[in-house]
């Protein structure tokens, strides 16, 4: 149908007060908002980003200062304009921007007063968006300042750079407008959560050969590599490349180490507050900046056996529309061509994690390694049954009168039949690394070592082979230092006879 001729036009300029308030509710959190400001600093060629906060004063603030190239006043006004860049424009590969909304929408999501001070070629410019002023005037007019002496943290600027200052932090107070201590506690808690987010999202910039330094109140942030590549136990698969018209997609899968191969602080840091079960999956990077992580995009389910699997996917900013990168740069969708390729490799990607857990689990049920439990798989079910032939059980049964042995083995069978499978499943699915064997007292451990050692020595096994076998099974493995002392004492006593 042919459209009719335009008879006239009417002014449909958005209401400034209404639209600028709407920009506050795009869905930013403090961590995604600060990340957007850091993006701008990196795009401006910064080497150092200093985040400064004051949370205990009557007027708390957050400031982000960098040493990038800075802006002229005209460039500053353009940067303060909502929608300053067309997302369809071709960008430099190092440009982390997207819609030209980040500075404004990210800032307004956290504060009602945004001040930007910038310096380049020896000239300093400053501009302010105050939402209370916009509400009164209902105009798209930014305030320009000539004197910056009264602006907080303006002294952080060097020869070149930009300062972003957030004041009137109405979205961060937690409702504690008059209780300064509670308000400060709330803001500081949010900042602590944000710190880990920045360490993760920008870890590749922080660990680059010429790293960017991000400091929070003077303390330098350490990179948080989700693939633990510096750990020698990490398994990295070869990189794969999918060539598309808009550019190449680089894919590399990693199997991070089992928690027994890492220190507890490093393991907890890597898993984060939600744990490793929620941290598995794809890690999508745009220009080396992490966009999205901890998802399999519906290609498979998150499970305990695959929680060590993490897959790096690198895309360029020329692929934004294909991947549906959102304004906050924390959401993406798989293009159909990439989804089809990943479906073909998803089993291999996950197999490394499953292999790591199965390898450790197999040691507990390997018939050549003195298992206290047998793993029995039949009729589509998996059962765990105490190994009544284990030297601990068999040796003790030999010392019992004949009429008591049947009752003893019945008790052992009841222990196996009463294994709390549902509770174990729930605990393993939630916090597997917190599930540990129970401690045994010295007398119990001594009896177990004596029985095991006696049987294996009688079978003419070498002492070094016996030690290797015992080190791999509980209760000896988790109390090995004590076990070794008991073994040494028994061997010494045998030699003295």
Image (cartoon, rainbow, N blue to C red):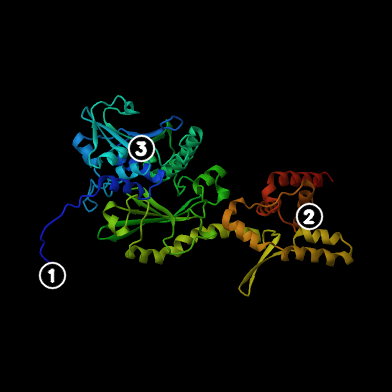
Q: Are marks 3 and 2 in contact (CB under 8 Å)?
A: no
Q: Count residues near mark 3 (Cα–Cα under 10 Å), then give few for <14, some for 14-19, many for 20+.
A: some
* The N terminus: image quadrant: bottom left
Q: Count residues near mark 1 (Cα–Cα under 10 Å), then give few for <14, some for 14-19, many for 20+.
A: few
Return the disc, 1 or 2, that comes first in the chain's sequence: 1
* Residue 70 percent across, percent down from the top left: 25, 34
User: Which image quadrant for residue 49?
Assistant: top left
Q: Which mark is residue 451?
A: 2
* Residue 197 percent across, percent down from the top left: 43, 44
Of the two numbered discs 1 and 3 in the rendering, the one whose residue sits closer to the viewer? 1
Above or below for 178 versus 342: above
Tell me if I can see residue 29 in this picture.
Answer: yes
Answer left or right for 68 relative to 361.
left
Q: Count residues near mark 2 (Cα–Cα under 10 Å), then give few for <14, some for 14-19, many for 20+.
A: some
Return the disc, 1 or 3, that comes first in the chain's sequence: 1
* Residue 152 percent across, percent down from the top left: 35, 28
Q: Which mark is residue 212?
A: 3
The residues tagged by marks 1 and 3 sit, at their Cα atoms, a distance apart of 56 Å
The residues tagged by marks 1 and 2 sit, at their Cα atoms, a distance apart of 94 Å
Tell me if I can see residue 388 in this picture.
Answer: no
Q: Which residue is mark 1?
A: 2
Return the disc, 3 or 2, that comes first in the chain's sequence: 3
- Name the foreground residue: 166 vs 21: 21
Q: Are marks 1 and 2 in contact (CB under 8 Å)?
A: no
| Residue sitting at x 48%, y 50% | 234
């Amino acid at each position: 149908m042919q459209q009719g001729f335009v008879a006239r036009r009417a002014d449909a300029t958005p209401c400034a007060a209404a639209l600028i308030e709407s920009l506050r509710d795009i869905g930013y959190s403090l961590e995604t908002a600060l990340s957007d400001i850091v993006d701008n600093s990196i795009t401006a060629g910064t080497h150092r980003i200093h985040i400064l906060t004051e949370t205990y004063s009557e007027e708390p603030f957050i400031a982000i200062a960098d040493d990038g190239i800075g802006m002229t006043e005209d460039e500053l006004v353009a940067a303060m304009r909502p929608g300053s860049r067309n997302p369809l424009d071709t960008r430099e590969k190092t440009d982390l921007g997207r819609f030209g909304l980040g500075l404004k929408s990210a800032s307004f999501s956290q504060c009602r007063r945004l001040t930007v001070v910038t310096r380049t070629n020896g000239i300093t410019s400053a501009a302010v968006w105050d939402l209370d002023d916009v509400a009164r005037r209902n105009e798209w007019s930014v305030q320009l300042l000539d004197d910056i002496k009264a602006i907080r943290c303006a002294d952080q600027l060097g020869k070149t750079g930009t300062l972003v200052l957030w004041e009137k932090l109405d979205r961060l107070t937690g409702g504690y407008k008059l209780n300064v201590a509670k308000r400060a506690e709330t803001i500081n808690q949010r900042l602590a959560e944000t710190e880990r987010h920045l360490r993760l999202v920008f870890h590749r910039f922080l660990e680059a050969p010429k790293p960017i330094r991000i400091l929070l109140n003077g303390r330098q942030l350490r990179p948080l590599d989700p693939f633990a590549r510096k750990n020698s136990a990490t398994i990295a698969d070869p990189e794969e490349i999918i060539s598309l018209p808009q550019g190449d997609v680089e894919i590399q899968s990693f199997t991070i180490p089992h928690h027994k191969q890492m220190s507890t602080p490093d393991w907890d840091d890597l898993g984060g507050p939600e744990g490793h079960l929620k941290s598995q999956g794809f890690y999508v990077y745009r220009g080396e900046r992490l966009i999205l992580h901890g998802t399999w995009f519906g290609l498979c389910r998150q499970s305990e056996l695959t929680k060590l699997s993490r897959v790096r996917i690198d895309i360029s900013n020329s692929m934004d529309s294909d991947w549906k990168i959102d304004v906050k740069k924390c959401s993406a969708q798989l293009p159909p061509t990439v989804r089809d390729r990943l479906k073909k490799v998803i089993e291999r990607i996950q197999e490394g994690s499953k292999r790591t857990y199965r390898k450790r689990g197999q040691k507990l049920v390997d018939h050549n390694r003195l298992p206290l439990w047998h793993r029995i798989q039949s009729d589509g079910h998996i059962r765990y049954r105490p190994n009544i032939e284990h030297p601990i059980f068999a040796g003790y049964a030999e010392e019992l009168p004949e009429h008591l042995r049947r009752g003893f083995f019945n008790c052992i069978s009841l222990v196996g039949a009463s294994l709390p499978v549902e509770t174990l499943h729930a605990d393993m699915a939630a916090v597997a690394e917190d599930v540990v064997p129970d401690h045994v007292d010295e007398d119990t451990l001594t009896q177990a070592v004596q029985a095991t050692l006696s049987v294996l020595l009688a079978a003419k096994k070498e002492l070094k082979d016996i030690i290797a076998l015992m080190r791999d099974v509980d209760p000896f493995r988790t109390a090995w230092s004590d076990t070794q002392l008991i073994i040494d004492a028994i061997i010494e006593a045998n030699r003295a006879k």
